Amino acid sequence: MSLLSRSAVPTRLLAGTLAVLLLAGGCSLPRVHKVTVQQGNVITQDMIDRLKPGMTRSQVAFVMGEPVFRNAFDDDRWDYIYTLEVPGYYEEQKVVSLYFEDGVLAYFTGDYAPTAETEAAEPSTASADVEGGGEGAAQPL
């Protein structure tokens, strides 16, 4: 029996050590779940492309939504702010400010601009009129 008890001690020790290592491996430092945070108005390039000077406040609100932040001192300025934060990986903040004159959209500034397609579409129709040479054709100054 003394042979049996000698071989049983290393086996028990090995089994105990293995159990402790497995349990300790599962109990590594706790990780806190970090949530992706989005705040403000989502702003897309399509929204910006749909904005045109002369739009009323209600038309702008239909396209962009009501601004989360309104300037208390200047009712003719609407600020749209969007932030996205993925903790430890990514942070983004986009800002667009719309300015109204006489109740209609005058211009806007910020991190977005109309796409080249939108800007190119308008001058191309004017250049077609110039090439046509009709009565209503725009003439260079």
Image: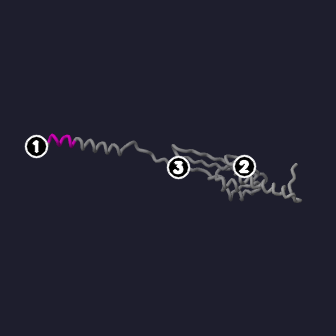
Do the CB atoms of the residues marked 1 and 2 lie less than 8 Å apart?
Answer: no
Which amino acid lies under the numbered mark 1 shown in the image of this protein? Met
Magenta-colored stretch includes residue 11:
yes
Residue lying at 57% horizontally and 50% vertically, measured from the top left: 38
Where residue 14 appears, x then y in whole percent? 24, 42
The residue sitting at the right extreme is: 135
Where residue 106 appears, x then y in whole percent? 76, 51
Q: Nearer the viewer, mark 3 or mark 1?
A: 1
**In the image, which residues are magenta?**
5-12
**Element under disc 2:** strand
Where residue 105 appears, x then y in whole percent? 75, 53
Residue lying at 35% horizontally and 46% vertically, measured from the top left: 26
- Residue, disc 3: 36
Along the line of sight, the residue nearer the viewer: 69 or 113: 113
- Residue, disc 1: 1
In primary-sequence order, the first of circles 2 and 3 is 3
Question: Is any atom of residue 103 visible in this view?
Answer: no
The residue sitting at the left extreme is: 1
